[in-house]
Image (tube, helix red, strand yellow):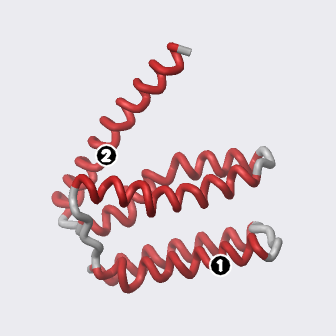
Amino acid sequence: MISAVIFFLGGLALLLKGSDMFVDSSVRIAKYAGISEVVIGLTLVAVGTSLPELATSVTAAYYGNTGLAVGNVVESNIANLSLVVGVSSFVSPIIIPETSISVTIPLMIILSFVTVLFIRSGWQVRRREGVFFLISYASIIIWTLLRLR
């Protein structure tokens, strides 16, 4: 039991240090390349922080634990919207970019609604639907990047 607590605390400390290094490096890359921090946040940081969730969901789906895969995605979004934004706003006020208010958040709501339709109707998210979500993500990123130029 004590070793589990030590590993947990050590992992938490490394996670916090790694997060600090990741954010600092992302901001430096953005400034060096003359790229908006919003663009770095929408691409590099968003993908980088989503990779653990992606690995968990893919592994769970591969082994037939689809409930775990869906739960991971749904709860991760709820945690990001409430826990992460809530705790971050205690540290410093969060200024939401106009692009997020006018485009990104409405698209997120629409895609969330489509996902709920899949789940509530008993549909399965198969390759065709997966391709739809991947194309949606790529389209949103490309459109946002073109708009921010």
Q: Amino acid at mark 1?
A: Val
| Res 22 label | 2
Residue in front for this viewpoint, 70 or 35? 70
Q: Amino acid at mark 2?
A: Phe
> Circle 1 sits in a helix, a strand or a loop, which is it?
helix
The percent position of residue 48, horizontal first and vertical second, equals 43, 52
In this rendering, position of residue 83 left or right of residue 132? left
Q: SS class of the residue under badge 2?
A: helix
Nearer to us in this view, 69 or 46: 69
Q: Is residue 13 above or below residue 30?
A: above
Figure check: 82 above or below 149:
above
Q: Residue furthest top?
A: 2
Indicate left or right for 78 with 99 as reference: right
Side of 11 where 131 appears, left or right: right
Q: Residue at x 26, y 55 (%)?
A: 90
Q: Say which quadrant the N terminus sits in.
A: top right
Q: CA distance from mark 1 to mark 2?
A: 32 Å
Q: Give coordinates of residue 122: x percent, y percent.
A: 82, 71
Residue 128's image quarter? bottom right
Mark 2 neighbour class, 10 Å CA radius: few under 14, some 14 to 19, many 20 or more: some
How far across and down, in percent of the image, does residue 75 sit? 58, 56
Give the label on residue 114, or none.
1
**Residue depicted at x 62% and y 53%:** 72
x then y, percent, for residue 37: 25, 64
